[in-house]
Image (cartoon, rainbow, N blue to C red):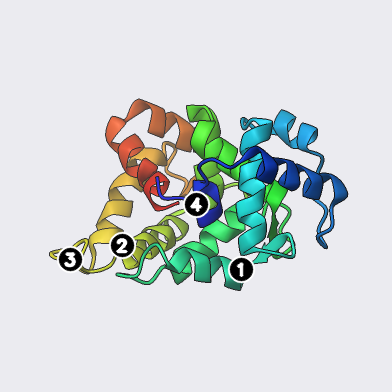
Amino acid sequence: MKLLPWSAAKTSSPAVQNSVEDELEMATVRHRPEALELLEAQSKFTKKELQILYRGFKNECPSGVVNEETFKEIYSQFFPQGDSTTYAHFLFNAFDTDHNGAVSFEDFIKGLSILLRGTVQEKLNWAFNLYDINKDGYITKEEMLDIMKAIYDMMGKCTYPVLKEDAPRQHVETFFQKMDKNKDGVVTIDEFIESCQKDENIMRSMQLFENVI
């Protein structure tokens, strides 16, 4: 799984960790992060991991929050061979759970915790939210196609050199037919989760999102 720069932190000296903890406690940045203990309880990261992640996040985003444009710039560094703009937009909206146009450290940690250490059910819930672009509780064929096109654009022509122009649509047609059990033109979260858990091919392909985060 490719992660954003601040999530790839390794280790840090005790002095640095103490300094980061002090920063968290003092909350000198404009956006005050939630107390470490609360974030530790709400995520699957340890206190030490949260300290390291916070330091990396603050280096990239000194204000304590990241807007969509900054998010896109950071994300594009991972995929120079393609255009990641559209996918980064969808991903940003999935992390921005309160839809206020900014991703805070808390937003980031809660999403990352699910993606890295969540159960299959939690990951599928998160994936459904990503594909449900307008957040109305359903995935339409067009929404799924928009996400798939964004992924193909981001991976670039060099990744899929012999890909046909209509490959994303064919991909979506196959999946949607399997997922839309009652043929009402939309996929509910129950249909989505049931389809993914029962069909290994769908599960593998849906996990494509894990490789582009």
Left or right for 131, reference 80: right
Mark 4 closeness class: few <14, some 14–19, many ≥20 residues within 10 Å:
many
Q: Nearer the viewer, mark 3 or mark 1?
A: 1
N-terminal of the pair, mark 2 or mark 4, is 4
* Residue 101 visible here: yes
Marks 2 and 4, how far apart at CA: 18 Å
Q: Which residue sits at x=77%, y=37%?
A: 36
Residue 134 higher or lower than 36, as above or below: below
Residue occupying the point 64% across, 30% down: 46
Task: Point out the residue furthest to the right here.
Answer: 26
Between disc 3 and disc 4, whose residue precedes? Answer: 4
How dense is the environment of label 2, judged by Cα within 10 Å: few (below 14), some, or many (20 and up)? some
Q: Looking at the rendered structure, which numbered label has been put on residue 68?
A: 1
The answer to whether mark 4 and mark 1 are in CB contact below 8 A is no
Image quadrant for the N terminus?
A: top left
* Tags 3 and 4 touching, CB below 8 Å: no
Q: Which quarter of the picture shows residue 153?
A: bottom left
Q: Which of 87 and 60 is in front in this view?
A: 60
Identify the amino acid type marked 1.
Glu
Q: Percent position (x, y) of residue 94?
A: 59, 53
Q: What element carries label 4?
A: helix
Q: Residue 131 carries which label?
A: 4
Specify the label residue 155 is tagged with: 2
The answer to whether any part of residue 125 appears in the image is: no
The reply, left or right, for residue 83 in relation to residue 184 is left
Residue type at the position of mark 4: Tyr
The amino acid type found where label 2 is placed reads Met
Q: Is residue 151 above or below residue 130?
A: below
Residue, disc 3: 164
Residues at badges 3 and 1 in contact (C-beta under 8 Å)? no
